[in-house]
Image (cartoon, coloured by chain):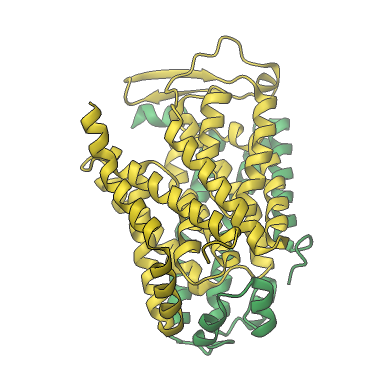
Amino acid sequence: MKQETVHADKVQLAYAAILSKATTLSIVFVILGYVVYIFQLLPLSVPIEQVSENWHLRASEFHQNIHAPFGWNALSDFGKGDALSYISILYLGAVTMFCLVAAGFAFLKEKNVIYTVISFVQLLVLIFAATGIISGGH
Amino acid sequence: MVLKNIRDWIVPGVLLMLFMIMPEMACAAETAMVADTVWWVWVLGLFVFTFLLGIVAVIAGVGGGVLYVPIVSSFFPFHIDFVRGTGLLVALAGALSAGAPLLRKGLANLKLALSMSLIGSISSIAGALVGLALPENVIQLSLGLTILGITVIMFLSKNSAYPQIEKPDSLSQVLQIYGIYYDEHLKKEVNWQIHRTPVGLVLFIVIGFMAGMFGLGAGWANVPVFNLVLGAPLRVSVATSVFVLSVNDTAAAWVYLHKGAVLPLIAVPSVAGMMLGTKIGAKLLTKVHTNVVRRVVITLLGVAGLRALLKGLGIWN
């Protein structure tokens, strides 16, 4: 075990520490959110049967037919079971960003200019995608 | 030897024949089932299916994402938009779960991953946007061709455990891409460096685009590029691929999330089933005949690719 950890530098260990915690948390969120959704422990925006009647349609047609929560709009339906499950998936999509923040600062601490820049530019690319600007986000 | 090879291909061959000679029966059964089946049967079936997929994916040494999209889009009633969105999440969840130990052991190299994923993630966003804008038949057709191509790559590829790099290229030196890890098989430390970095960057643009477009985890492409093109050791290639995949799939997944192409009803049982199956598969890894499983997986992938191709051509809907 000692030999295994020798070759992981501080940045990798910082990234791994955040990754491990954030991923465990995301698995718990995703499962809890789904239990709330599927057992209808909270009211739903759209009945499950209605979702299953339309899941053969293209995503755009699906959302024209029914108003299921998606994108950042899901946050406004926070008290609904389906929105809660969707928000837990949004969190899963954010885990890599948390890790990149840790990596960026760890590289900065090491005065590694190239990888500080690469880490934060990479973070900006993911934030850009997450805002939904390019995908006509909701 | 020849007899052994023939024997190893019997199970995949029978599977292939069953799929090929009964398309009408399969279609008729599918139509009736889709109309009559209650939602929870599909959801439960999806969980069980992805659990089994997770087991065979690990044993066969392939990522779950690349199996998920073609097979689920072929045999479940969900639109391919939702299958692709979920495929990215399945691959992402698997990569995130596997990541921390690989970094701690020093097998994955963050500098190598970040150098390639920066450009790959931008192209995966573009791929996702294009993929969600194209007509369904074009997607099915190109997915079919891609999956058949992957099947050929998996069938023919011969990885190199410890490639010998005479001279690293200057870009890799500027980017500080080199390393050392403890190899449990060799019981010694292995120094490594890479070459042909600019070629690798171009290839990761293509891989990122395809991953975003089809919702595939791209381990099938990342590993050969790291290993055979850049010359990284196989263990480093496999481990680093996980991080490229996690960044690229995160970027593309956000596009699918904002386009409404992710349904929790489908996504969560798929992610949970795949992760559970992957854990069981890892435990079974030393106890089963991996060659036979790998051949079954390659055959399944080939059939699913053919099915997507025929769907795209309007021959088998």
Q: The yellow chain is which one?
A: B
Residue at the (69%, 67%) spot, across then down: B258
Q: Position of residue A26 (x, y in %)?
A: 49, 62
Q: Can residue A111 be seen in this view?
A: no
Query: Which chain is represented by green in the image?
Result: A
Q: In this view, does B158 lie to the left or right of A15?
A: left
Q: In which quarter of the image is the N terminus of chain B?
A: top left
Residue at 49 percent across and 72 percent down: it is: B77
Residue A135 visible, this angle: yes
Q: Is residue B316 above or below residue B230?
A: below
Q: In this view, does B270 lie to the left or right of A132?
A: left
| Residue B285 screen position, x and y as percent | 27, 43
From the viewer's perspective, is A129 left or right of B211? right
Q: Nearer the viewer, residue B177 or B52?
A: B52
Residue drawn at x 60%, y 81% is A78
Q: In which quarter of the image is residue B10?
A: top left
Residue A112 in the image: state x and y as whole percent.
69, 30
User: Is B124 located above or below residue B110 in the figure?
Assistant: below
